[in-house]
Amino acid sequence: MPRPQKCRKICSEPEYISFFPDGFPANEVIYLSVDEYEVIRLVDLEKLTHEQTAKQMEISRTTVTEIYESARYKIADSIVNGKQMVITGGNYFICKGKHNGHCDRNCMHKCVSQATPKSIVKKGSNIMRIAVTYKNGEIFQHFGHCEAFKIYDVEDNKVVSSQVVDTNGSGHGALAGMLKELNVNALICGGIGGGAQNALNEAGIKLYGGVSGNADEAVEALLNDSLSFNPNIKCSHHGGHHHGDGHKCGDHGCGSHGCH
């Protein structure tokens, strides 16, 4: 029986999570895990040795070398063969130190395992998949802090199945990649920031933001073309809310808190 994989320490999740060849449709997607991204950042950008990187990430030097070789191959495959690259998943915990290659020792030892549930990845060609930010039956109002999505499979304009998927503490930078992996076509949510909107757009996921209330009812409303949403929702993490249609963020359940 193989030993369980040890959590890898990273300074922060990546700001940019999707890359694709400009002007050409990507014929395949390469998935780079967050810990692979961190090894590339430390070795190739910060110029740390494999031994220094191992100490930084609290893993063995051999493991660093294995991760580095895997990551470099994926990056080369993406560049040479014109494949989209999405950074998501992995087995890691996030340090509270600054993103400067010298994290402190006061870390959040909550391991984030972001393996996509295998039971929900495949879907039929006639299925539309809708995700809703979810908590206790309601639409959760802060995309970046969402702890779960409820996933609905729709065929002939009717929900044929649904399942709640835990995000395992993923930050906002990885959530769009997770939805991409889940083959989601549309997202219903409350507040969401511009960066996350761009990531969803790059992933080809239709956004219905500024929605509050019961999750099941919102999906039914979407299928009946009666969903009330804000196509111009703009929530910043600094607490300032600006909506192109003149509505206040609080009108959509966002409240006075910053939306990510």
Image (spheres, helix red, strand yellow):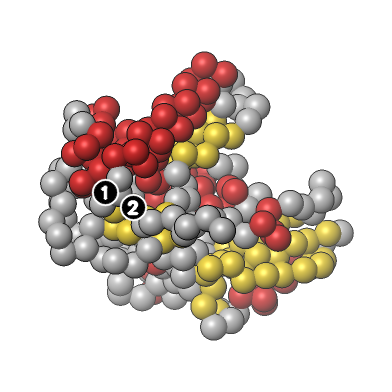
Lateral position of residue 63 relative to residue 157, left or right: left
Say if residue 181 shows up in the picture: yes
Are the residues flagged by discs 2 and 1 in contact, CB closer than 8 Å?
A: yes
Looking at the image, which residue is at 62% across and 25% down?
Answer: 25
Cα–Cα gap, marks 2 and 1: 5 Å
- Give the amino acid type for the residue marked by disc 1 in the picture: Met
Which class describes the residues within 10 Å of circle 1: few (<14), some (14-19), or many (20+)?
many
Which residue is farthest bottom? Answer: 136
Which residue is farthest front? Answer: 1
Precedes in sequence: disc 2 or disc 1: 2
Which residue is farthest top? Answer: 80
Tell me the tag on residue 8.
2
Which class describes the residues within 10 Å of circle 2: few (<14), some (14-19), or many (20+)?
many
Looking at the image, which residue is at 52% across and 16% down?
Answer: 80
- Give the amino acid type for the residue marked by disc 2 in the picture: Arg
- Which quadrant holds the C terminus? bottom left
| Label 1: element kind | helix
Residue 221 percent across, percent down from the top left: 69, 70
Relative vertical location of residue 106 with respect to residue 90 in this rendering, above or below: below
Say if residue 247 shows up in the picture: no
- Residue behind mark 1: 57
Looking at the image, which residue is at 52% across and 23% down?
Answer: 77
